[in-house]
Amino acid sequence: MTEPYACAPLIREIGRGKDGSRALAREQAGALMGAILDGRVSELELGAVLLALRMKGESVSEVAGFLDAAEARMARVQAPAGRPVVVLPTYNGSRHAPNLVPLLAWSVAHAGLPVLLHGQASDPARPGAGSNAARVPTIDILEQLGIEASPDAAAASRALSDRGLAYLPLAVASPGLARVVGLRRTLGVRNVAHTLAKLLRPVQGPSLLLSAYTHPEFGAMLAELFALRREAALLMRATEGEAVANTRRAQRIASWLDGAETTVVEGAERAEAELPALPAREAAPTAAWVRAIQQGQAPLPAAIAAQRDAIVDAAARMGRAA
């Protein structure tokens, strides 16, 4: 029988509100998240922990510890020999504009770098918070392009070797984390598992994470995290929650390599004078537009090309630093 994990001592630390709470040490946070992912925390205590962390705001030490636990339990896809894998988490989809994550993934893979996407698309047929009924998830467009979700890490490894592109569901990469992400329907709000999911690198071998933030404070926390963990990453302001360039106005993209930050794409204060022609937001026309670009019948948007080039350059610098 699995031994329950008592959360009361930790809840006393993190559950006193934004001003009265204290952050957990990295080791404490790792032990707590490990117990959560192993199913050793009761539903009552789990709800209290998740809401307390949301109200307090997660510290860098806590997120680092939570990641330690998640990474120790996640499935890993084998990286093709000699090349870092570009990891592109995709959990938001798009609500107002076409979802360009599949286009970015294809353009990077076409440039010679393997790309692993991972995500957890909500079921719009189910009611409740987080249904994302108005969003177009990345997997819907990938399926239109003939790319199915990999049922396990071995299948994703083969897809990376064969075509340089794979999609791994979060439920395969980290079943425990997927369960906690799904609690948004029960709690009505997002929780720390959503943050962790977007930071996972389910890869055996070198990887370059594409990361994004929606609020400046969160971006600052991620920058501190990448410096602490000294892992390769590109960080930018999100486009509808995704780490893909905005075709209307360039975002600054920062590269993190061995703990050091470098600006690799400069941001723009104003929207582009001439905006590229984009398809309708739905999955089918977006997929058709991506096919047209693949076949040379339509141009790749300049913002996506600049992001691809920054990714390729960062991967090359990883190789030189190794």
Image (cartoon, grey):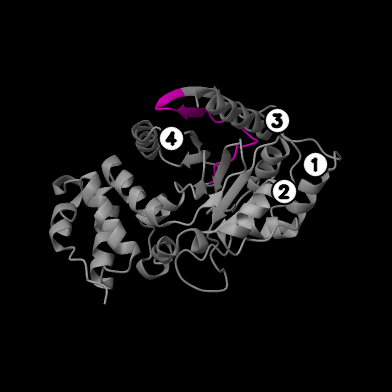
Q: Residues within 10 Å of mark 1 (few under 14, many from 20)?
A: some
Kindly report the distance in space between the C-alpha atoms of the residues bearing marks 2 and 3: 24 Å
Q: Residues within 10 Å of mark 2 (few under 14, many from 20)?
A: some
Kindly report the distance in space between the C-alpha atoms of the residues bearing marks 2 and 1: 17 Å
Indicate which disc residue 231 carries: 4
The image position of residue 54, as x and y in percent, is 30, 54
The image position of residue 138, as x and y in percent, is 62, 54
SS type, badge 1: helix
- Say which of marks 1 and 4 sits in front: 4
- Say which of marks 2 and 3 sits in front: 2
SS type, badge 2: helix
Amino acid tagged 3: Ala
SS type, badge 4: loop
Q: Earlier in the sequence, mark 2 or mark 1?
A: 2
Kindly report the distance in space between the C-alpha atoms of the residues bearing marks 3 and 1: 12 Å
Indicate which disc residue 163 carries: 2
Amino acid tagged 4: Glu
Q: Residue 262 colored magenta?
A: no
Q: Are marks 2 and 3 in contact (CB under 8 Å)?
A: no
Q: Earlier in the sequence, mark 2 or mark 3?
A: 2
Q: Which residues fall within the magenta stretch?
A: 242-261
Residue visible at 24% across and 64% down in the picture = 48
Q: Earlier in the sequence, mark 3 or mark 1?
A: 1
- Say which of marks 3 and 4 sits in front: 4
| Tag 3 residue | 302
Amino acid tagged 1: Ile
Q: Does residue 197 lie above or below 1 as drawn? A: above
Residue visible at 38% across and 53% down in the picture = 72
Taking depth in this image into account, of 34 and 191 the one nearest to the observer is: 34
| Tag 1 residue | 293
Kindly report the distance in space between the C-alpha atoms of the residues bearing marks 1 and 4: 32 Å
Q: Does residue 185 lie above or below 304 as drawn? A: below
